[in-house]
Amino acid sequence: MNEIPTTKPVFAFQFPSSGKSLLPADFLYQDEAGFGRISKLGSCWSPKNYRPNISSHLIREFRYCYGAVDAHAGESFFIIAGGCNTAWMNEFLRQLSEAYPNDYIILVMDNAIWHKSQALEIPDNIEFTFIPPYTPEMNPIEQVWTEIRKRGFKNRAFQTLESVIDKLQEIIRGLNNEILKSIVHRKWVCSDFEIE
């Protein structure tokens, strides 16, 4: 993310709110999702005339994953947090800014209340832009959460919250740039910015 490869788009923006005009900018889609011990049951393959037996439970223990993904390069940044609120959003922004101190980042996100809180501490190298309300299809990172659930959370009963966190970390580590790019790449984003 610090060096811009030739295949990565370069954006020049003038932001009305701050008057900043910076080049280059990294365009990342941001969202958060909950992962916990409530089992997610789904269809699966089994031998003919055999009904699979899947253990499940409804234990309300969760952790939340904050993520940002570049739809063009597949680069990503994730943290596992204790909640979805302004304090954790501030921590995510701080860590994202520290991970990419020389980059200017435009985060495309939904309208969650903690994304618009007056108590948000937005680093100088990060700017927000919001998708319209009730349009999750405009935020491609939503499909990343679906892929994570498919890879390790469907038809699973976790005995501890730590095992949920371990599985989440394992799956995120397995999502390399090419996999993420294949999940989040959208032609309509590329056409808006005249990118191939």
Image (cartoon, rainbow, N blue to C red):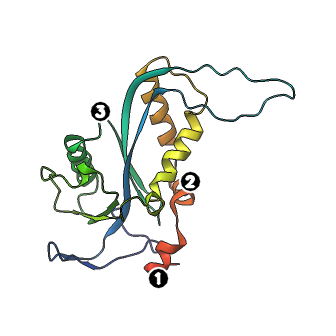
Of labels 2 and 3, the one closer to you: 3
- Mark 1 or mark 2, which has the lower sequence index? 2
Task: Give the vertical position of 64 relative to 114 (above or below).
Answer: above
**In the drawing, does residue 81 fall left or right of residue 149?**
left
Q: Amino acid at mark 3?
A: Gly
The x, y position of residue 147, in whole percent, is 55, 46
User: Residue at label 2?
Assistant: 179
Q: Secondary structure at mark 2?
A: helix
Task: Give the vertical position of 12 relative to 155 (above or below).
Answer: below
Q: Residue at 29% of width from left, 64% of height from top?
A: 105
Q: Residue at 23% of width from left, 58% of height from top?
A: 101
Q: Residue at 52% of width from left, 64% of height from top?
A: 185
Determine the image quadrant of residue 80: top left
Viewer-side residue, 133 vs 114: 133
Residue at the outermost right position: 48
Task: Give the vertical position of 165 relative to 106 (above or below).
Answer: above
**In the drawing, does residue 158 fall left or right of residue 113?**
right
Q: Secondary structure at mark 1?
A: loop
User: Residue at label 1?
Assistant: 194
Of labels 1 and 3, the one closer to you: 3
- Mark 2 or mark 3, which has the lower sequence index? 3
The answer for how far apart the CA atoms under marks 2 and 3 are is 27 Å
The x, y position of residue 18, in whole percent, is 14, 72
Q: Amino acid at mark 1?
A: Glu
User: Residue at label 3?
Assistant: 82
The answer for how far apart the CA atoms under marks 1 and 3 are is 39 Å
Bin the neighbour count of mark 3 within 10 Å (Cα to Cα): few under 14, some 14-19, many 20 and up: few
Q: Secondary structure at mark 3?
A: loop
Bin the neighbour count of mark 2 within 10 Å (Cα to Cα): few under 14, some 14-19, many 20 and up: few
Q: Amino acid at mark 2?
A: Ile
Where, quadrant-wise, is the N terminus in this rendering?
A: bottom left
